[in-house]
Image: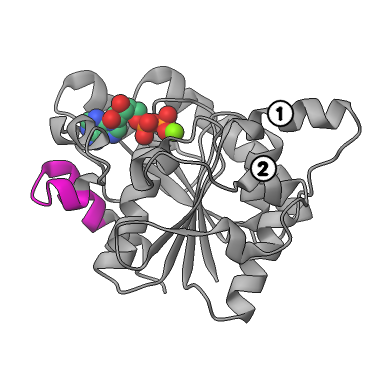
Amino acid sequence: MKTIAIVNLKGGVGKTVTAVNVAAILATEYGRRVLLADADPQANATQSLLPPGEYNTLAGLLMGDEPYYENLIYESGIRGLSVLPADDDLRNLDADLLEGRRPHMGAIRDLRDALAEDDACDVMVIDCPPALSPACAAAIAASTDVVIPIKLDAYSVRGMNELTAQIRRLRRIYPDVHIAGCLPTVWYRCDAVEQGEKLLRENAPCRVFRSHIRRSPKVDESTWTGEPVVTWSPRSAAAQDYRAFVAELMEET
Ligand SMILES: Nc1ncnc2c1ncn2[C@@H]1O[C@H](COP(=O)(O)OP(=O)(O)O)[C@@H](O)[C@H]1O
Ligand SMILES: [Mg+2]
């Protein structure tokens, strides 16, 4: 089952916006049954698709507290799109480790295989935290495609080598993991961004998608609405670019 982990160790690069919009496009425009798994304790993806409330979360899955995946998956307001929520408990996994309780690093991978076996889902998209935490490593271990959203400043572009090296290290243990590519986000016309993009395309240690995602005020606006920008403002520049990106991502499948 195609499992797309959205990864970058930096925050504020558009991981959550990418995860939510890719998941929404696959559900609404490709008719796929999509599960968005939220692996970030900040739970922004969960908040953008589910109403406030008490949910079973990915932390329970990783700690083996919730054996039935049906109890972890919630329907969003978008047809075909379900959510496996995150909460603050994911932050405690590091402390659990210190107390000798180990998160099960294969838990998301096992979930993926169970969903595939039951024919319950077509694609899983995982929104990762900005750190190589246990939840992030478990997400990468479960993925078939790692997508790296990247902002085009020098720190981010230089950080790419380190990030791809870390992901490739995990690949030695989980050989299905493959870096699908990096996706320039929050793009706008100015010399620094255009030069950054050119440098990235010439030197990136992995594929760079042809698409980039333009900066659009509709994205911030959409975060207040509980809707992805692709449904909130389908004609906005960012929505158009996310659709082009998903077409590119799905080219080989
Ligand atoms: N294409 C875009 N245009 C404008 N703002 C964006 C765009 N993509 C992301 N943002 C904004 O940037 C901020 C960080 O995005 P987010 O997806 O939360 O990043 P991350 O998950 O990597 O921390 C948010 O305020 C979001 O609304
Ligand atoms: Mg995020």
Residue 57, labelled with which disc?
A: none
Q: Position of residue 9 (x, y in %)?
A: 55, 29
Farthest residue in the left direction?
235
Q: Amino acid at mark 1?
A: Asn
Q: Main secondary structure of the magenta part?
A: helix
Task: Kindly state the secondary structure of the residue where label 2 is placed.
Answer: helix
- Asked if the residue under mark 2 is in contact with the one under mark 1, i.e. CB atoms within 8 Å, the reply is yes
Residue 83 to residue 80: above or below? above
What residue appears at the point 52 percent right and 47 percent down from the top-left corner? 85
Q: Is residue 219 covered in magenta?
A: no
Residue 202 visible in the picture: no
Task: Kindly state the secondary structure of the residue where label 1 is placed.
Answer: helix
Disc 2: which residue: 59
Task: Give the mark nearer the N terminus: 1 vs 2.
Answer: 2
Q: CA distance from mark 1 to mark 2?
A: 9 Å
What residue appears at the point 34 percent right and 41 percent down from the top-left corner? 48
Farthest residue in the front direction?
54
- What is the span of residues highlighted in magenta in the rendered image? 230-244
Quadrant where the image shows the C terminus: bottom left
Decide which of 174, 1 is in the foreground and name it: 1
The crowd level at tag 2 (other Cα within 10 Å; few <14, some 14-19, many 20+) is many
Residue 214 to residue 124: above or below? above
What residue appears at the point 66 percent right and 71 percent down from the top-left corner? 113
The crowd level at tag 1 (other Cα within 10 Å; few <14, some 14-19, many 20+) is few
User: How many marks can you see?
Assistant: 2
Q: Position of residue 137 (x, y in %)?
A: 68, 43
Q: Quadrant of ligand 2?
A: top left
Disc 1: which residue: 92
